[in-house]
Amino acid sequence: MKQKPIIFGLIGGIALMLPLCMNSSVAPRQVVASGSSPRSASLSSKMTISLADNSESEIRSYYQSLNSLSASERTGDNLLKNLKPILQDFDYYSYDAVWKIYEITDREWALSPASETQYGTYDSAKNQIANYEFGSTSNGKNNPYVHTLYRNRDENNVTIESGRIQEWGDHTQNGGTNREHVWCQSRGFKADSGANGPAGTDIHHLISGDGYVNGKPHNNNPYGYVDKSKIEIDSKDKYAYCAGNYSGAPLHPHSQDESNIVFEPQDSDKGDIARACFYMVACYNNLAGDNNITQFNPNLTLVNYATSNGEREMSSNGHAVGMGILSDLLEWHKLDPVDEYEIHRNNLIYNNFQHNRNPFIDFPEWVDLIWGDSKGNKSASPSSDVIYEGKGTAPAKPSDSGKSSDDTIFGMPKQQALIIGGVALGVAVLIVIIVLIVSPKIRKKAGKAVKKTVKKQAKKTVKSSTAKKRK
């Protein structure tokens, strides 16, 4: 009875095929739902960098702890409260390390594709860079171009030629790139030696930005639409590639305004900035009454007026420091929806560095559940809500920098298609084995049928040959 070992071996082979088929995506990280807190981390001298985007199932898994909560705990301030323990389970780095991290997270992939990596080995099959070496001011090494806030971009979402800059180029406020705190440090937390983590070096809001715009029109000004008849600084007057970034009087004044100056970025950056601000409030708050607020792990909120651009205001357990103008940020979120670059940056941060995500990039509709008309009327559902809802039409990134163009097969995600195909193939082979080995009668009949056909064909051949000779 040799059939059983063959069958069992085949079944075992199918079982081994499944994990191989499933290995085409980044494994989801285990998330601590409560009691988590940020951890100080450092970069390795050589790293393996994953360039893959996470699958929908992996993204949903990251927020899965929300699924067990009641509907009321998944809307409004309660949703912010319950997002915090998820988001605060992350690693943060030194202010100096941020420049190195930008080589990956803020890279201009169209100008510096992964395939051109010199200090490290790019593997297109695994979509990763092994033994990646970061540069420095003395030796830029790979020295990629960086995607910089406030610099104009062309139709391919690439900074126009006059505004292009490499990571280890100019870091000054005159034509260089800065580490831009989207949430100004003066609004809630301390800045020793430039900046300190967790909040001061959180990559989700610390983004590569133009130095001039960072230091002048933005400075510590709150966000809002500028009254174009009352512009204070028009960035294009200094650098043509910074056109569209202004500071000036708010277009929509509020009775509570603490400042008569607001900052308005160019349209292509408005949504990115809004979602970074939303993230900061979700990650740094005291809505649960944890009373774990420190000078570097602040208590933040968003308000519907122009907040102060003056002296630093510190938060505390009982005092949340606000940033405005909320109503304008909500408009910007819709005006400039998430695009491929922003999505890919979120995944690069999650897979390689901080290991946490911006939920308002993953689930844009959650903004409305917290601050919009859906607050209290609808609840977040990570298991079914649309991921990247309303995603913009910015061109996709190059195939060697993230999710490649062949990540689907027959319209299905590659991982799903490989699993289905592997199982189908295994089942088909198993059926054939059963029919031919386990059922000897069928095999015997099949053998007789083949012999009969061969004899019949042989007779025809002989007759045909005889007939030709007679002619």
Image (cartoon, helix red, strand yellow):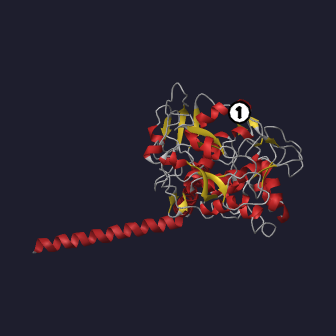
Mark 1, residue position: 41
User: In the image shown, does 419 or 223 lie closer to the viewer?
Assistant: 223
Q: Badge 1: few (under 14), some or many (20 or more) residues near its Cα, within 10 Å?
A: some
Q: Is residue 72 above or below residue 26?
A: below
Is residue 77 at all visible to an observer of this figure? yes
**Residue 380 location (% of width, % of height):** 76, 63
Q: Is residue 75 above or below residue 118?
A: below
Is residue 14 at all visible to an observer of this figure? no
Q: Which residue: 54% across, 64% down?
A: 435
- The answer to which image quadrant residue 4 occupies is bottom right
Which type of secondary structure does the marked residue at label 1 adopt?
A: loop
Q: Which residue: 73% across, 51% down?
A: 259
- The answer to which image quadrant residue 187 occupies is top right
Asked if residue 199 lies left or right of residue 413, the reply is right
> Which quadrant of the figure contains the C terminus?
bottom left
**Residue 205 location (% of width, % of height):** 67, 45
Asked if residue 470 lies left or right of residue 121, the reply is left
User: In the image shown, does 276 or 417 lie closer to the viewer?
Assistant: 276
Three-letter amino acid code at disc 1?
Answer: Ala
